Image (cartoon, helix red, strand yellow):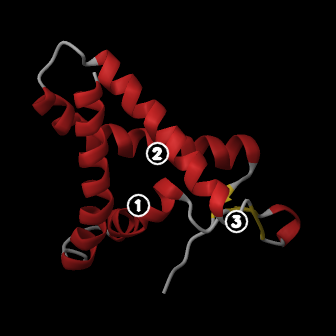
């Protein structure tokens, strides 16, 4: 199971880097929403700048700094362990194929839950 978890971690890290580069290269051909999602995927997945709460028309940032990476690493490790456990009888190649779509789905779901249940979003650093 550790080998499958390492496959998940490796493909996940590559997806963080590759999706941003793909969005920059192919932004002319992609719909704007998809290009933005791919470009900001590393920030959405790891939340390095913290979280914002747009309550009362004042955007307030909280959980800034070191705790974010630890929380994000723990979250994605739990997801990786779950995927490794659920796909323990399959080849590691299957985990490599499943990692990016599942991480997008889980990440998007977590962001939607944070936004609509707790009125919290991820602080983004945009050009």
Q: Check residue 41 in the rendering and tell me which mark sits there, or answer none.
A: 1
Do the CB atoms of the residues marked 2 and 1 lie less than 8 Å apart?
yes
User: Label 1's element?
Assistant: helix
Q: Quadrant of the N terminus?
A: top left
Circle 3 is placed at which residue position?
64
Side of 84 where 41 appears, left or right:
right
* Disc 2: which residue: 107
Q: Is residue 48 left or right of residue 118?
A: left
Number of residues whose C-alpha sits closer than 10 Å to that of mark 3, classed few (under 14), some (14–19) or many (20 or more)? some
Identify the residue at image location x=44%, y=37%.
77
User: What kind of element bears circle 2?
Assistant: helix
Numbered disc in front, either 3 or 2: 3
In the rendered structure, the answer to whether residue 79 lies left or right of residue 62 reads left
Residue 62, position as x, y percentages in the image: 76, 62
Viewer-closest of 35 and 92: 92
What residue do we see at 24% from left, 47% from top? 11
Does 107 sit above or below residue 90?
A: below
Q: Can you give x and y, in whole percent of width and height, for residue 57 in the image?
A: 83, 70
């Amino acid at each position: 199971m550790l080998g499958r978890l390492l496959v998940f971690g490796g493909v996940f890290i590559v997806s963080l880097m590759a999706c941003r580069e793909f969005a920059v290269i192919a932004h002319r051909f992609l719909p704007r929403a998809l290009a933005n999602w791919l470009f900001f995927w590393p920030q959405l997945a790891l939340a390095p700048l913290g979280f914002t709460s747009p309550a009362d028309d004042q955007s307030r940032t909280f959980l800034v700094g070191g705790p974010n990476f630890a929380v994000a690493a723990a979250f994605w490790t739990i997801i990786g362990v779950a995927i490794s456990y659920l796909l323990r009888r399959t080849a590691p190649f299957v985990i490599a194929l499943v990692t990016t779509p599942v991480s997008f789905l889980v990440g998007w779901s977590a962001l939607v839950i944070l936004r609509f249940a707790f009125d919290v979003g991820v602080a983004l650093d945009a050009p």
